[in-house]
Image (cartoon, rainbow, N blue to C red):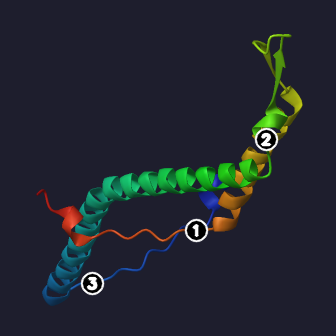
Amino acid sequence: MPKIYSRNKIKIPNVIVNIKNKRKLFMITLFIIAIIVSGKMVLNAVNPIFDTLCENQAKSLATIVSNEQATNVMREHTYDELFTIEKDTNGNITMIKSNVIPINEIISDVAIKIQEEINNKGREDIEIALRKFYWY
């Protein structure tokens, strides 16, 4: 006889459910399904609102931080460092030459300080007002 037929069979208990227990089981199952469906409907309504609020909060934070850090970095520099003005013998401007090294330093300093500030901010709390759920 092949081995597959000689294995132990799974024993499933024979549960006898009377009519009262069937009704309770049905009501509990119906209640659980109603809670799950209601939760899913609420989450479907909240997700687009939450995504929009998160995106707006992130844009606002990035704008504020980038403006602050650009201002802080530019306080340390003057425009004379960034450009060289060459004039002829009559005092007329013949050439405006940009100094690339200080400009690149400023660009990299701003980017680094913005990233550091965003990393230091951590998590921001976002609240959803109940009026956002209504259509008007």
Quadrant holding the C terminus? bottom left
Find disc 1 in the rendering and name its residue.
123
Question: Any mark on residue 16, and which?
Answer: 3
Labels 1 & 3 near each other (Cβ < 8 A): no
Tell which residue pokes out farthest to the right in this image.
101
Residue carrying label 2? 106
Left or right: 37, with 57 as reference point: left
- Residue drawn 14% across the image and 83% down it: 23
Label 3 crowd bin: few (<14), some (14–19), many (20+), radius 10 Å: few
Q: Distance of mark 2 from mark 3, alpha carbons? A: 80 Å
| 92 over 56 or under it: above or below | above
Q: Position of residue 24 (x, y in %)?
A: 18, 86
Q: Amino acid at mark 1?
A: Arg
Query: Which residue is situated farthest in the front direction here?
Result: 90
Residue type marked 3: Ile
Residue 47 at x, y percent in the picture: 35, 57
Viewer-side residue, 74 vs 131: 74
Judging from the image, what secondary structure is the residue with disc 3 in?
loop
Q: Earlier in the sequence, mark 1 or mark 2?
A: 2
Number of numbered markers: 3
Helix, strand or loop at label 2? It is helix
- Camera-side residue of 56 and 92: 92
| Residue 18 placement (x, y as % from top left) | 18, 87
Q: Secondary structure at mark 1?
A: loop
Say which label, 1 or 3, has the lower sequence index: 3
- Contact (CB < 8 A) between labels 1 and 2? no
Q: Is residue 122 left or right of residue 130?
A: right
Q: Amino acid at mark 2?
A: Ile
